[in-house]
Every structure is written in C-alpha cells, then in structure tokens.
Image: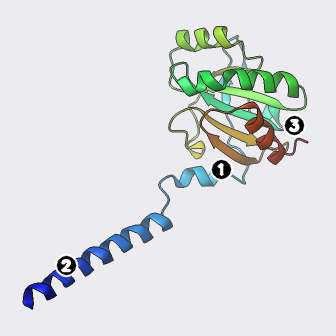
Amino acid sequence: MRLRALAWAGGGTVAVVLLAALAWGLLHPANPAEASVLGRAAPELVVQRLDGGKVTLSELRGRPLVLNFWASWCAPCQAEAEALRQASESQSPAVGFLGVNFRDSPEAARAYQERNKLPYPVGPALNGIPPAYAVVQPPATFFIDRDGVAVARFDGPLTGPLIHRYLQLAGVR
C-alpha cells in the first residue's frame, strides 16, 4: 500500500512538472524576435551589392518587397532560386526584390549569383542582419507591403505559387 502511494505521488509530480514545462513553452516562444518584426515596419537594412554599390531597404519602399535571406551553401536556397528569378522578372517593376547573403564568403556568394543570375540586388548586409529578423538559417523570406510593414515570413524554399500567395498578403493582386 505504501509503495503504491509513493508511486502515485511520484507520477503526479512528474505530470505537474511536464504540464508546467508545456505552459512555459506556450507562454514563452522559442524565437520571440520573429514575432516582433511581423506587423511592424521592417528594420532598416543596407546591402552591399555584389555588382557594386549599396541599396537600403528604405529606398525600396513604395511598392511591395520580397526580402530573401540566402546562402551559397544552402541547398534549399538553390532550389528556390529559379522561382525567385521568375517571380522577380514577372512582377517587375510593381514588386521589389532584395537578396541578403547569409554567412557566406564573397567568392561563394558571387559564384552563386553567377549560377542563378538573380535580376535584383543581392549581397551581404553591411552592418549585419538586424536581430528583429531572427534569421537563424536560410532560406528565410519576408514579404513587406508598400508602406514598409513586414506582413509575412516564410522559412524554407519558396515555389512560384507560394511567392504569388504571399505577395497577395503584401497587397499584390
């Protein structure tokens, strides 16, 4: 009888600890910075273009924008490159595109751009990627409306239909 009571008490304690951990996880998301950029003005970003010059995020305001974080070593980035190139060509000039290189060497980034021939500005962020974007690994893509507000985020490789759907959220019809 005493052993049974002890087993129930131990099992109850484990259940309480597990429920408390679940509640903590639900109330404290693993990546709170990700949520902070959505619905707000996208933080300023200065990109050193691989083909020379600089471009800022604020220069691209006034039209919807696809902000894509990529890397040459990222297989999913390579998989989505053609869809991004086609979307950029078909949506230009109504929609802007900007590619931000993520943790890459300049040589590898240039080779990636030479392979994919993305028709929009690409390059590394000059002063680093603002923490509010919470990019941990590429590909990560933000869809920003014409007022500069980040309306959606997609992690993983994009396809043409996905880009079209997310552009609708950014106000493109």
Disc 1 element: helix
Of marks 2 and 3, the one in the foreground: 2
153 or 105, which is in the foreground?
153
Residue at image point 75% right, 21% down: 85
Q: Is residue 4 left or right of residue 89?
A: left
**Amino acid bearing label 3:** Arg
Tell me residue 44's x, y (percent): 69, 38
| Callout 2 touching callout 1 (CB < 8 Å) | no
Distance from Cα at disc 1 to Cα at disc 3: 18 Å
- Residue 145 coordinates in the image, percent (x, y): 81, 44
Q: What kind of residue is marked 2? A: Gly
Which quadrant is home to the C terminus? Answer: top right
Assess disc 3: are there few (<14), some (14-19) or many (≥20) residues with their C-alpha within 10 Å of its C-alpha. Answer: some
Q: Are marks 2 and 3 in contact (CB under 8 Å)?
A: no
Q: Circle 2: is it few (<14), some (14-19), or many (20+) Cα within 10 Å?
A: few
Query: Of the residues under marks 2 and 3, which one precedes in the sequence?
Result: 2
Amino acid type for the residue under numbered disc 1: Val
| In the rendered image, the vertical position of residue 42 relative to residue 15, given as above or below | above
Q: Secondary structure at mark 3?
A: loop
Q: Which residue is label 1 attached to?
A: 37
For residue 113, side relative to residue 13 (left or right): right
Label 1–label 3 contact, CB within 8 A: no
Display colour scheme: rainbow
Numbered label tally: 3
Pinpoint residue 8: horizontal percent, then vertical percent. 20, 83
Residue where numbered disc 3 is placed = 63
The residue under label 2 is 10
